[in-house]
Image (tube, grey):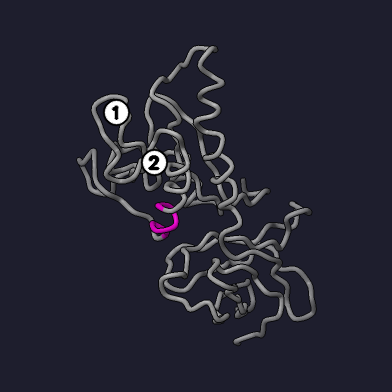
Amino acid sequence: MEKNPFVLGGNLQGGELVVAYPYDMVRSTWKTQEHTPTPDDHVFRWLAYSYASTHRLMTDARRRVCHTEDFQKEDGTVNGASWHTVAGSINDFSYLHTNCFELSIYVGCDKYPHESELPEEWENNRESLIVFMEQVHRGIKGMVRDLSGKGIPNAIISVEGVNHDIRTGKKKAACLQFHCARLVESPQSSVQPSGRVTPCRVNCTHRELLVQVSIKKRKLINVCVQYFHSID
């Protein structure tokens, strides 16, 4: 995951109908359940909702609950740590140590469905999987280069107001080197669709650059533009 800077991930599980997003481990000592959001909580909640809302059953108020917990109040989504704490989960690891935003997707009540039930399970999740994968395009993306046009590997991408950075690809990942991609919260509620410019800071080993990121229409920040200037 260090060689290939993934942006979005989902691990598929069974035994429940819910999408769990990080953090998965509580911060308070001796607690087994506690709402523990990441700095990108709004993004994770949207990603979880994008899957749950397009699933055939997750947000269907008429369906029975799988076991004893009803996740309808959060539209088929749940913060992992508020459900049950898990130490060292792949979701937490991916968020803290890579560029990847990963969630746990519980696709059905039956943990081990019979072979004859698989076609129906596929139909239940088909649209959700497609919509979830499409979310990888929500955010900033592009190539990070210096003023001479040379790519900058391992540059830090920071979003103002969010205490979580990502890095561009390293040189040894030739097809992805210098690539910048980061999921961000929708600006629809706070940004006018007139093309406002938002700063995206790129911190490098010897210099800090200000990348101009344009917002088009009502979509998310769309392009990490290559035209930027040094703010040294």
202 over 83 or under it: above or below:
below
Amino acid, disc 1: Val
Q: Position of residue 143 (x, y in %)?
A: 71, 67
Q: Position of residue 101 (x, y in %)?
A: 51, 50
Q: Is residue 180 toward the left or the right of residue 65 in the image?
A: right
9 over 40 or under it: above or below:
above
Q: Position of residue 38 (x, y in %)?
A: 38, 55
Which of labels 2 and 1 is toward the front? Answer: 1
Q: Quadrant of the C terminus?
A: bottom right
Of mark 2 and mark 1, the one earlier in the sequence is: 2
Q: Is residue 27 toward the left or the right of residue 146 in the image?
A: left
Q: Magenta span has 204?
A: no
Disc marking residue 189: none
- Residue at image position (60%, 80%) is 210
Q: CA distance from mark 2 to mark 1?
A: 16 Å
Q: Position of residue 137 (x, y in %)?
A: 61, 57
Q: Magenta span has 41?
A: yes
Residue assigned mark 2: 20
Give the main secondary structure, helix, strand or loop, of the magenta stretch: helix
Amino acid, disc 2: Ala
Mark 1, other Cα within 10 Å: few <14 / some 14–19 / many ≥20 = some
**Which residue range is magenta in the image?**
40-45
Residue assigned mark 1: 65
| Secondary structure of the residue carrying numbered label 2 | strand
Looking at the image, the residue that sits furthest to the front is 62
| Secondary structure of the residue carrying numbered label 1 | loop
- Residue at image position (53%, 59%) is 183
Q: Is residue 85 toward the left or the right of residue 189 in the image?
A: left
Mark 2, other Cα within 10 Å: few <14 / some 14–19 / many ≥20 = many
Residue 132, image quadrant: top right
